[in-house]
Amino acid sequence: MTEIPTGKPDEKVDNTAQVIETTTKLINKVTFFGDSAIPEGDPIFESVKETAELLAKSGYTIVDGGGPGIMQAATDGAQQVGGRTVAIYWEPKLAAHFEGKNTANLTDESETYSNYVMRTLGLIEHGDVFVVCKGGTGTVSEFGMVWCLAKLYYGTHKPVILYGDFWDELIEAFQRTMYIDDVEMAVLKRATTPEQVLALIQSFEEMYQKLDLKPRDGDEAGFIINPKVKVTAEAYKKVAEQYQAATVGKNVAQKQLDEFISMVNPPAQVLDVGCGPGNDTKYLSTKYAVTGIEMVKRFADMASVETPNAEIINADITTYDLSKNKYKGIWARDSLHHIPEENLDPVFKKLSDGLVENGVLYVIVREGEGEIYEREKKRYADMKRFYHLFTVEELESRARKAGLSVVKIDHVQRSHKWLVGVFKKQSLNFSLEKNS
């Protein structure tokens, strides 16, 4: 039998050492497949739960079918450490031999299908890597589809990890009795411990980061590793100098900056998220001790020159370990809408944790629905950028989930429709009263 590579714990990759200038994490969601009949306390249940817990602790969103058994184990493991979870439910109208939706498997986000094939596609599209555990015919069908897709899209395929020590015998039978080629074997990886699963995912991330992957649209986009935010970082990197020349000395959100200053009384530590070349940072630094965080290195270098009295950090807010209880105010203009949906709740929570009690988060984002790539022709460049558009309800919901109370949300019309959200970190006493 051709050996299926195993992830080794000592092969872990330190993603924090990556150059943030042109990259962001490509693997964000892990989909678990497995049997619904495996009970809590079973060694397989507990092992999957430990795996999901470790992955969630490492920043990955956990996706499963929303049922009992392995699916419940995956959700429980992630939620045990405050991780983000997604359920893709199946609620058939005519299938008599199905256990039904598990009301105990409640997740942060969910979708429901009555069509089994569409539900399977939903599980595939939501995941960036698949962990296939012990299961029955449903798991066999899911495994067959992700295995086939991995072969068809080999090179940009979503990886398949076979979890458990029983897989060698099965794959050997496939090789002995079916026509299985080298590529079909190459896309399969095997793991028997949570640490090996994490090590494999980190190795996939390292491999894909070395490739110049381009964002893809269309019906097949959900079957491959598909970068999102990278396109925005690349666009800004290419036109950084021209962008600075066109915007230097101009604060397009002057009114909002002054309102932010009126709410955050100096002296104070303030954070500017996605500070770009430092225009807003420079203005805020006349009142505060300012830290700017910027993922495009060229912009970060410019901000450092323009505002020497501010601390400028070249990092991605989605992966950067932000200090807790430090900032009296956080300013986030035109930055959070460049973050894909799967990273938004963790970022809002990170910003909330970074605020001191009663600290202010001031957000300006594009208004709308869905996620889009938009080509914008400026006089200094022609850029293609990724946007996650916000409704008032979504902005308010994400803020409240992160422990922030809503001060106000305004609509602003510039070149597009914008939302200006002002939020305050709830005091400990307020949180206790609310939960009592």
Image: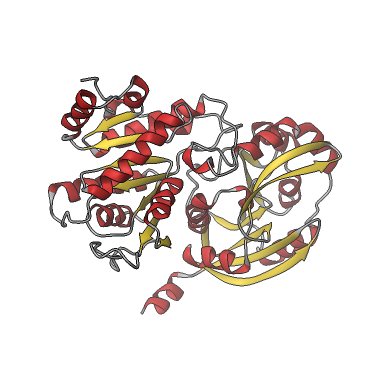
In the displayed image of the protein, which residue is found farthest to the left?
A: 42
Nearest to the observer: residue 329 or residue 225: 225
Number of numbered callouts drawn: 0
Residue toward you, 82 or 91: 91
User: With respect to residue 75, does 224 lie above or below?
Assistant: above
Q: Residue at x 44, y 31 (%)?
A: 152
Q: Give left or right: position of 417 versus 77.
A: right
**Residue 371 in the image, given as x and y percentages of width and height:** 61, 52
271 w.r.t. 316: above or below: below
- Residue 379 visible: yes
Residue 283 % position (x, y): 76, 50
Residue at screen point 23% across, 62% down: 97
Q: Out of 321 and 296, give the one closest to the viewer.
A: 296
Decide if residue 54 is in sight here. Answer: no
Q: Residue at x 74, y 51 (%)?
A: 286
Q: Where residue 33 sits in the image (x, y, percent)?
A: 30, 47
Closer to the camera, 232 or 281? Answer: 232
- Judged left or right of residue 312, residue 238 is right
Q: Quadrant for the C terminus, please.
A: bottom left
**Where is residue 79 drawn, in percent x and y?**
33, 57
